[in-house]
């Protein structure tokens, strides 16, 4: 049982000292602020650098220097198979079979590649369902695909409006939109965790509903991967895509990922092909005919960027040791503490947008400042000046994400105390 929360530093320090995952913080570089560690709540935007990354990247540079082209076959981790060294770790983090996942490209690129295969509109079934206020890349990507196929977003893009008081989406709203439009929806593309509200969606329930209407189902897991324990395979989703620089801590512009459900592993789906997606056994026969590797690997285009995969490999090793279940357990306590502080100490200053039910959110709390946007900006800037790093999302949301790998209970308390200090001067 977790003890009742208390709003004082002794209590927070005691929790941090007793935290079984507490030592992982030392494996990360915490950006400094005026000679101290900053309070870094931006792991949902750019996760922090694991200390071991530098050595891992340097090792590949050394192999390149010493081995040249032979590095593809020699060295501790030959480049030829390098993307396979992250496969099991990725599969574990997203709850998939190893053959269902691949690390490649970036999120936006993977979304387009997956839509080439999984968005095949017909005159009867041509629409894509996304949430209103979706992340720009998702909106631009689906809109451009609709146009590419000769359809018009005005008719073929359906944006699901949030129906709950804070703009979040109930399952009933998804049921309603499917009941009304399901027969013309080709593809459902929803977030695992919505980036602005922090709402976590029930992937399995959505997939089951949408499959009943004959829709293909996909998820953008940018804010879910490394944040929530996922069961992608069991969810039944057709495909998913994600980036690795947020909770997965794999560095700016890190290599993204994709999931393709096993049921599509052997299907001869149309796709944009490249030599790295070709059956590995015959790839170097360099024949003219493309024979895809079964599973998610078959969507690869290029030989992978080794220097960019090295940090992902390091990071997944940290996740393996920590375990998603333990991380989630701590995350529930840490974000629960932050929420408790906001609701009990700051109720006249802040409003939490993110759903209160812990199963409907991950690490992030999206917070509005009572009194409007200008006050919100002022608080955000005050926090940044005081080394409390969150981020601002237009029009009026401050996002605060305690990451269980490196954030502490004391960080949450520091946030609350800074907001209190600001509200007294403001
Ligand atoms: C962060 C994020 C992206 C970023 O896409 P990139 O291709 O990695 O630049 C896309 N979608 C969502 C929902 C995000 O949160």
Image (cartoon, rainbow, N blue to C red):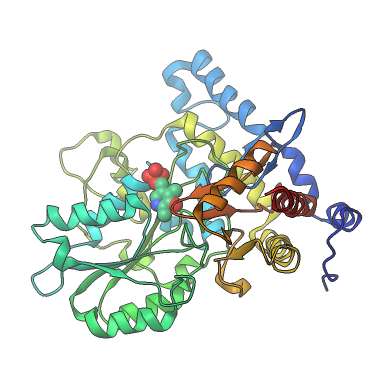
Position in image of residue 399 (x %, y %)? 56, 53
- When the figure is inspected, residue 351 is found, relative to residue 46, above or below; the finding is below
Q: Quadrant of the N terminus?
A: bottom right
Position in image of residue 304 (x %, y %)? 40, 35
Task: Decide if residue 201 is on the left or right side of residue 104.
Answer: right
Task: Decide if residue 371 is on the left or right side of residue 420.
Answer: left
Q: Which residue corresponds to the image point at 10% horizontal and 61% vertical from the top-left? A: 151
Work out whether residue 160 or residue 328 is closer to the camera in this orientation and state it: 160
Work out whether residue 151 or residue 204 is closer to the camera in this orientation and state it: 151
Q: Is residue 138 visible?
A: yes
- When the figure is inspected, residue 336 is found, relative to residue 319, above or below; the finding is below
Work out whether residue 261 or residue 203 is closer to the camera in this orientation and state it: 203
* Residue that extends furthest to the top in the rendered view of this protein: 65
Q: Which residue corresponds to the image point at 33% horizontal and 61% vertical from the top-left? A: 265
Residue 212, quarter of picture: bottom left
Position in image of residue 385 (x %, y %)? 66, 36
Q: Which residue corresponds to the image point at 43% horizontal and 80% vertical from the top-left? A: 171
Task: Decide if residue 235 is on the left or right side of residue 179.
Answer: right
Position in image of residue 273 (x %, y %)? 23, 45
Q: Is residue 102 visible?
A: no
Q: How many marks?
A: 0
- When the figure is inspected, residue 73 is found, relative to residue 7, above or below; the finding is above
Task: Decide if residue 161 is on the left or right side of residue 91.
Answer: left
Q: Which residue corresponds to the image point at 38% horizontal and 75% vertical from the top-left? A: 207
């Amino acid at each position: 049982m977790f003890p009742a929360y208390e709003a004082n530093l002794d209590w927070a320090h005691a929790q941090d000292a007793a935290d079984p995952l507490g030592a992982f913080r030392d494996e990360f570089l915490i950006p400094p602020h005026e000679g101290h560690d900053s309070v870094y709540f931006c792991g949902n935007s750019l996760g922090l650098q694991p200390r071991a990354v530098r050595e891992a990247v340097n090792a590949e540079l050394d192999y390149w220097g010493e081995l040249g082209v032979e590095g593809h076959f020699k060295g501790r981790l030959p480049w030829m198979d390098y993307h396979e060294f992250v496969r099991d770790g990725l599969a574990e983090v997203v709850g998939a079979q190893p053959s269902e996942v691949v690390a490649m490209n970036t999120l936006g690129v993977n979304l387009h590649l997956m839509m080439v295969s999984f968005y095949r509109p017909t005159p009867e079934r041509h629409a894509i369902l996304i949430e209103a206020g979706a992340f720009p890349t998702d909106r631009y990507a689906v809109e451009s695909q609709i146009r590419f196929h000769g359809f018009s977003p005005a008719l073929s893009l359906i944006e699901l409006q949030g129906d709950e008081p804070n703009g979040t989406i109930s399952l009933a709203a998804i049921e309603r939109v499917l009941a009304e439009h399901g027969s013309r929806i080709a593809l459902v593309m929803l977030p695992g965790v919505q980036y602005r509200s922090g709402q976590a969606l029930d992937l399995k329930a959505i997939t089951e509903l949408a499959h009943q209407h004959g829709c293909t189902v996909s998820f953008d897991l940018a804010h879910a991967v490394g944040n929530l324990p996922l069961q992608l395979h069991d969810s039944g989703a057709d495909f998913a895509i994600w980036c690795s620089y947020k909770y997965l801590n794999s560095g700016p512009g890190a290599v993204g990922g994709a999931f393709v459900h096993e049921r599509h592993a052997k299907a001869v789906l149309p796709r944009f092909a490249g030599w790295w997606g070709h059956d590995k056994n015959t790839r170097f026969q360099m024949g003219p005919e493309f024979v895809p590797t079964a599973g998610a690997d078959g969507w690869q285009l290029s030989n992978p960027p080794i220097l960019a995969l090295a940090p992902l490999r390091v990071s997944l090793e940290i996740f393996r040791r920590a375990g998603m279940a333990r991380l989630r357990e701590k995350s529930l306590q840490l974000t629960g503490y932050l929420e408790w502080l906001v609701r009990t100490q700051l109720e006249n200053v802040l409003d939490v947008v993110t759903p209160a039910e812990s199963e409907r959110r991950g690490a992030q709390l999206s917070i509005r400042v009572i009194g409007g946007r200008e006050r919100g900006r002022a608080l955000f800037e005050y926090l940044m000046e005081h080394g409390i790093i969150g981020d601002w999302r237009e029009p009026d949301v401050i996002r605060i994400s305690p990451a269980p790998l490196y954030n502490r209970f004391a960080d949450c308390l520091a946030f609350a105390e800074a907001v209190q200090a600001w509200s007294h001067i403001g």
